[in-house]
Image (cartoon, rainbow, N blue to C red):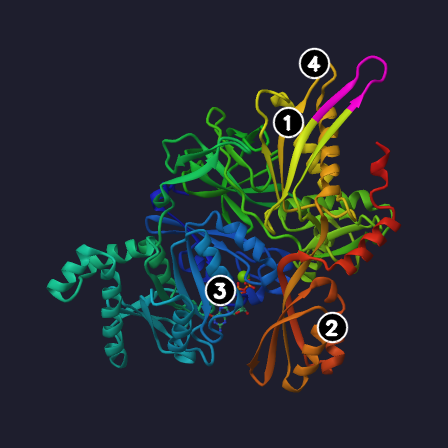
């Protein structure tokens, strides 16, 4: 493979609602670029990026995948992302590696729930993007209607850069509105069009759309505006760079059209990515920290800088072992490089780096700043870690993921497989950051938690297929959390004088509530060496460990800040262990005064039922502590939207079936955590106490 510098690289994520055709479109683009020798099909299990067995079985994407096309002078790295709501954490996690996005919109369905969600992610990551109205060949596909919906959702800066030639069965090509040329595609799926004259019945529409595009490009660009006023138009040689800049600056969101399954529009799409989407160098610099918890610093995205690379994804391959996907943030990563993992402080050798094509890798000699690659068998590098040249440390921040919304007790089918279970699950946790594995504080069962039932089921299927391990899933559990509602201050002191060497650690901490979702913050406010520097992390560790075991009912304590502001030490008797215990004691004392309470996950629920059932459904939701948020007609049915605590939804599937004689459907996703009402919380706490939660703690 050729070596590409950052300027010749495009890192393009395809995002959108489930089933809009992202995976199929990437298969078409790769075939058109000659990267694979047949047009892969999602439905036949032959796409490049849905290569995992679970994806092939289910025919939708479960995790983010990578593929590349060498197209003229550029290499386009495509990130395929899932569109199904419970796998959105994968999508968000992959976007850190993207520098531009194609937002897919279904030509029949238009704007859907995850369309808005993925658009929001792109906003958050400041990604330049274009909108692709895909599946233009479907019955009832409409460019005009879909464009209108997209504009209503995302505003007037959404502007066509192409028009479809024909729709539904007759969709056969595109008009390029920049160059005012038409391209007709063969029915054979080659993806290679023939240039043609713009069809007569499209001429007026194309001219109007061309002028609208020119006006929009000129709008934010004084030089082009002048030219436009002078000549009444802008020639392609100025329009191309003008549009490119407008896309880069996120002033405009061009609209393109395609049909991935028939491979129509592909060559134009590849050209568009090469000509108009931003290269990774356009971000100029990235922000990181000097070390975990350190000061902010910036690094130029350039080859002449020290090497730094961010690991954004890990795949647990039963044969190749752990495969780490990384983005080169600065410098040039060479094959066989010896780098330092700045997050963990260990040395890593990158043998056999490669460019990723779905499940396979092409060996490369080096990867330049801005490029994306993978390497197998790193010793202890995980997703979220930063690697780089030892003398120039930097760590890049990790995206903050949502919390899992549902937990299931799991148990191996054959006894004696417990050890195997924990090893296998830990490898899967490396791959999927939203999966959690823990012990139920009350029943001591193993718990597997995820974004939704299907997420956990997929994990179980992987356990079986990859690790040959069969487990049973039991009834779902609610992943409660604990938090505080008031400030508190306390001393945590650990002092023991047993014979010779004693133990001494002493800290004063202040605890205060943080906003929901903020997690945990530790502030070191020690002045004048009341506690020596090297013991401060031990205090934090003691608090973190104690918080993970909970205070009320054994659930992790979240959303609070601890300020360590004073303490004392002993020259001989102080140790890390002693300060850890001091931290843990201080934490518990603070919890006593800080008005602790339980939190429960609240779900966004959408229920579609026959109209005649809607009254019953709403009454029933009220009984489940639900808050109705709206009701709208949908086809011949009614869709009810509500927020309901997860604990009230565990038995919903069967209740809905009986209330609607099987005609109702529902979906839900995690919204946020909220405080459990006192009466209910009391029962949960009492049950936990009865089960002996927190007992062993007292023994220390
Ligand atoms: N008619 C038609 N069908 C298509 C087209 N593109 C995709 N499909 C079909 O639509 C379904 C979904 O395609 P995918 O590529 O898996 O969609 P996706 O966006 O990757 O879906 P998720 O991975 O769940 O987010 C498959 O059955 C495809 O065969 C198209 O251009 N035309
Ligand atoms: Mg897909």
* Helix, strand or loop status at disc 4: loop
* Helix, strand or loop status at disc 3: helix
Q: Which one is earlier in the sequence, the residue at label 1 or at label 2?
A: 1
Residue with the mark numbered 1: 566
Q: Is label 3 or label 1 in front?
A: 1
Question: What label does residue 267 carry, if any?
Answer: none
Q: Which one is earlier in the sequence, the residue at label 3 or at label 1?
A: 3
State the residue in front, 261 or 152. Answer: 152
Residue with the mark numbered 3: 116
Crowd tier of the residue under label 4, counting other residues whose Cα lies within 10 Å: few below 14, some 14–19, many 20 or above? few
Determine whether, in the image, residue 16 is placed left or right of residue 245.
Answer: right
The alpha-carbon separation of the residues under discs 3 and 4 comes to 59 Å
Residue with the mark numbered 2: 623
* Helix, strand or loop status at disc 1: strand
* Helix, strand or loop status at disc 2: helix
Determine whether, in the image, residue 71 is placed left or right of residue 39.
Answer: left
The alpha-carbon separation of the residues under discs 1 and 2 comes to 49 Å
Choose top left, top right, bottom left or bottom right for residue 228: bottom left
The alpha-carbon separation of the residues under discs 4 and 1 comes to 17 Å
The alpha-carbon separation of the residues under discs 3 and 1 comes to 48 Å
Crowd tier of the residue under label 1, counting other residues whose Cα lies within 10 Å: few below 14, some 14–19, many 20 or above? some
The alpha-carbon separation of the residues under discs 2 and 4 comes to 61 Å
Q: Which one is earlier in the sequence, the residue at label 3 or at label 4?
A: 3
The alpha-carbon separation of the residues under discs 3 and 2 comes to 31 Å
Residue numbers of the magenta segment: 495-506
């Amino acid at each position: 493979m050729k070596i590409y510098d950052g300027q010749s690289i495009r890192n393009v994520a395809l995002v959108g609602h489930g089933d809009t055709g992202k995976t199929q479109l990437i298969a078409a683009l790769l075939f058109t670029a000659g990267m694979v020798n047949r047009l892969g099909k999602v439905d036949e299990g032959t796409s490049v990026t849905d290569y995992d067995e679970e994806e092939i079985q289910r025919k939708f994407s479960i995790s983010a995948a990578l593929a590349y096309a060498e197209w003229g002078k550029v290499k386009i790295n495509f990130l395929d992302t899932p569109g199904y709501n419970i796998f959105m954490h994968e999508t968000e996690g992959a976007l850190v590696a993207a520098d531009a996005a194609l937002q897919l919109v279904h030509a029949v369905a238009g704007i859907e729930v995850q369309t808005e969600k993925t658009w929001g992610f792109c906003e958050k990551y400041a990604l330049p993007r274009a909108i692709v109205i895909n599946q233009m060949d479907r019955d009832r596909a409409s460019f005009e209607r879909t464009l209108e919906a997209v504009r209503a959702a995302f505003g007037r800066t959404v502007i066509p850069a192409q028009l479809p030639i024909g729709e539904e069965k007759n969709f056969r090509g595109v008009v390029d509105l920049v160059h005012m040329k038409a391209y007709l595609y063969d029915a054979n799926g080659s993806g290679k069009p023939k240039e043609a004259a713009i069809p007569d019945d499209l001429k007026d529409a194309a001219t109007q759309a061309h002028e609208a595009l020119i006006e929009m490009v000129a709008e934010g660009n004084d030089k082009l505006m002048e030219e436009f006023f002078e000549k009444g138009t802008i020639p392609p040689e100025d329009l191309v760079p003008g549009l490119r800049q407008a896309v880069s600056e996120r002033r405009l969101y061009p609209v393109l059209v395609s049909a991935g399954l028939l491979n129509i529009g592909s060559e134009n799409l590849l050209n568009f990515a090469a000509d108009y989407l931003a290269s990774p160098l356009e971000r100029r610099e990235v922000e990181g920290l000097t070390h975990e918890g350190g000061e902010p610093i910036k690094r130029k995205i350039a080859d002449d800088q020290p090497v730094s690379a961010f690991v954004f994804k890990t795949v647990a391959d039963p044969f190749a072992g752990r495969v780490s996907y990384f983005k080169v943030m600065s410098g040039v990563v060479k094959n066989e490089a010896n780098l330092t993992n700045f997050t963990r402080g260990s040395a890593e050798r990158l043998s056999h780096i490669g460019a990723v094509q779905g499940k396979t890798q092409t060996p490369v000699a080096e990867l330049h700043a801005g490029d994306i690659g993978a390497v197998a068998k790193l010793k202890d590098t995980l997703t979220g870690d930063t690697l780089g040249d030892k003398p120039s440390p930097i760590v890049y921040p990790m995206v903050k993921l949502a919390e899992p919304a549902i937990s299931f007790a799991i148990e191996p089918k054959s006894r004696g497989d417990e050890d195997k279970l924990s090893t296998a699950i830990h490898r899967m946790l490396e791959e999927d950051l939203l999966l959690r594995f823990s012990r139920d504080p009350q029943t001591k069962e193993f718990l597997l938690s995820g974004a939704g039932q299907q997420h956990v089921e997929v994990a179980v299927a992987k356990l079986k297929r990859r690790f040959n391990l069969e487990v049973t899933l039991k009834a779902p559990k609610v992943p409660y959390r604990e938090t505080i509602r008031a400030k508190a201050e306390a001393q945590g002191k650990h002092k023991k004088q047993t014979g010779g060497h004693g133990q001494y650690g002493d800290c004063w901490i202040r605890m205060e509530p943080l906003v929901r979702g903020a997690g945990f913050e530790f502030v070191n406010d020690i002045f004048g060496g009341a506690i020596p520097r090297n013991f401060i992390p031990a205090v934090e560790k003691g608090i973190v460990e104690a918080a993970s075991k909970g205070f009320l009912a054994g659930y992790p304590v979240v959303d609070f800040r601890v300020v360590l502001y004073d303490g004392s030490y002993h020259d001989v008797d102080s140790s890390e262990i002693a300060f850890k215990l001091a931290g843990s004691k201080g934490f518990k004392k603070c919890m006593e005064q800080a008005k602790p309470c339980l939190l429960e996950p609240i779900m966004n629920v959408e229920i579609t039922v026959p109209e005649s059932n809607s009254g019953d459904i709403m009454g029933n939701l009220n009984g489940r502590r639900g808050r109705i948020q709206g009701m709208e007609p949908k086809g011949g049915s009614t869709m009810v939207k509500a927020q309901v605590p997860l604990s009230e939804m565990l038995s919903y599937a069967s209740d809905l079936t009986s209330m609607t004689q099987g005609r109702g459907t529902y979906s839900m996703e995690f919204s946020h955590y909220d405080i459990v009402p006192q009466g209910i919380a009391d029962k949960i706490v009492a049950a936990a106490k009865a089960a002996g939660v927190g007992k062993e703690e007292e023994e220390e």
